[in-house]
Amino acid sequence: MFCHKCGAQIAEGAGFCHQCGTKVIRTDNTSAVSNLKQTPDSPIQTTLPEADNSGFKAFVDNHIQKVTDFQSAEELLGSKVSLRFLWICLGVAALLGLITLNPILLLFFLLLGYAAARVICGVKKGRCAFRYQGKMEGEIDTDDLIRFMITHLSYLQPYFHEWGYIKREALSVRGAVQEAAADAIRASTQEIGICTPFGEEQRRMAVLIIRADPTDRDSGKKEYFTDAENRLEGASFLSHDMGFQKYKCVVKAAPILQVAMEYYFNHYQRN
């Protein structure tokens, strides 16, 4: 069985083409693909679209080229995210501490520089999430969205893995109280989060948040944006960073999840 868009061979019973991501449409117990067997005497003749923008991968890469300095999603995911602001904050703090010639003041300035770097990191992560957020109207079948993410982003392993609903857990009594308060806020905003382990080591979770538009909650409009969380399962305390690795996760995942949602609403759901 072959894809009617790109000509790639598809396994029997598959719902999507593994090459271009096109959904297999079945009508009257038949499939909208070619059931021809490729032989030297009868090669498959496939006509591709002129710009090849119908395939999911081409659609993603085209978007990545527009909104980032990279040419493809793979190149973006394989890049290094700069933490120059962290080293600048620590460097300035260390310089001020050395000028005083006082080890206690040196430690104080280093802690102050680290705290400043964390604040800057949080601001930069928030700006990145805001830059790649999107808007939608109406209800969304999150189960169907999860299936879409699993099938269409599978080509980007080992960065994206199995998708599911996020489950937040607290490590302390204080954390439990904070999480309970956060749950109340999420309920008031009708917030839903789906996530996937991110990266080869899978220590972070790339999270896609869908919630009521805070600027117009009565209209039924929703917004979606990318966030990141530390993954508790199989992780030690030392593996939990103070926000810098989560910032890297958002920088890499946000543009891809933005275009994946755009494709889901404008192409996948309409097929």
Image (cartoon, rainbow, N blue to C red):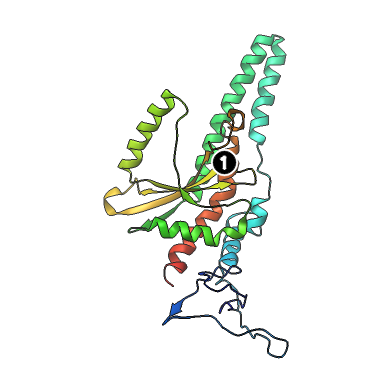
Q: Position of residue 12 (x, y in %)?
A: 55, 74
Query: Where 110 sits versus 215, above or below?
Result: above
Please tell me which residue is depicted at 32% across the width and 41% down the height of the picture.
187
**Local crowd size for mark 1, using a 10 Å CA cut-off: few (<14), some (14–19), many (≥20):** many
Q: Which residue was labeled with disc 1?
A: 204
Foreground pick, 200 / 85: 200
Helix, strand or loop under label 1: strand
Residue depicted at 67% across the width and 35% down the height? 84
Q: Is residue 230 left or right of residue 177?
A: right
Q: How many marks?
A: 1
The C terminus - image quarter: bottom left
Q: Nearer the viewer, residue 110 or 243?
A: 243
| Residue at screen point 37% across, 58% down | 140
Nearest to the observer: residue 70 or residue 193: 193
Q: Give coordinates of residue 90: x percent, y percent.
A: 66, 25
Which quadrant of the figure has residue 239?
top right
Q: Position of residue 44 (x, y in %)?
A: 65, 85
Q: Quadrant of the N terminus?
A: bottom right
In the picture as drawn, the residue positioned furthest to the left comes out as 218
Residue 4 % position (x, y): 56, 79
Instruction: Identify residue type, mark 1.
Output: Arg
In the rendered view, would you say 182 is above or below 36? Answer: above
**Quadrant of the rendered image containing residue 89:** top right
In the image, farthest residue toward the bottom: 41
